[in-house]
Image (cartoon, grey):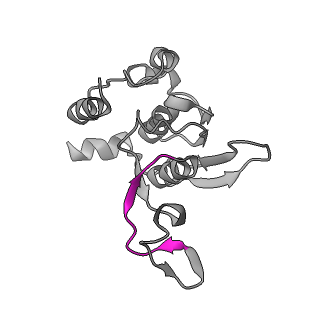
Amino acid sequence: MTNDDEKARRDDDDDDGDDSFLCPQVRAEFRADTWSAFAECSVVVGMHPDQATESIMAFAKAHGKPFAIVPCCVFPALFPDRRVPADEEDAEEDAATEEGDEKEIKNARHVPVTRLAQLVRYLARETGGRVTHLDFQGANRVVYSTEPPRGFRTPASRAEDE
């Protein structure tokens, strides 16, 4: 199956629980239909979770759990729909910056997540989480929240929509 076929399949079946893109270990232990086994946890932690990163984020959002994710591998071919506003490295030539604030980019285009720094920004944006560095070498940026992540909806608020 090509990347385009995989993307089209996921777009067509977004809410069907298809987890074929996950590694076998994650597929066996951590998927939407087994989340109830983890419902009583007080925090969700992913330390270099590879393909489970999205599932951890989704679980934390669905269940209103505080979380900490230390991502390492990006897997852009498996997750082609991840996009972030371009940063300085992505858009040096085509984005004007505010004077004195080189982090803010005007008229930024969105680019696919292909680098670890982009994945960290993506996770923080999707969850409303904070980012900090851990005191060790390598992939050491953690996206975390001590409160339910952005996007969490209580059962009562979901019932109001029905």
Q: Is residue 149 left or right of residue 137?
A: left
Residue 120 place in picture, x, y as percent: 55, 49
Q: Which corner quadrant holds the N terminus? A: top left
Q: Is residue 154 left or right of residue 116?
A: left
Residue 23 place in picture, x, y as percent: 48, 20
Asked whether residue 112 is drawn in magenta, I would say yes
In the displayed orientation, state which residue is furthest to the bottom: 99
Q: Nearer the viewer, residue 131 or 66?
A: 131
Q: Nearer the viewer, residue 162 or 16?
A: 16
Where does the magenta region start and end? 103-114
Residue 133 place in picture, x, y as percent: 71, 51
Task: Please tell me which residue is depicted at 58% across the width and 29% down the height of the picture.
Answer: 41
Residue 148 place in picture, x, y as percent: 51, 47
Asked whether residue 131 is drawn in magenta, I would say no
Task: Please tell me which residue is depicted at 45% across the width and 48% down the height of the picture.
Answer: 113
Q: Does residue 40 lie above or below 90 as drawn?
A: above
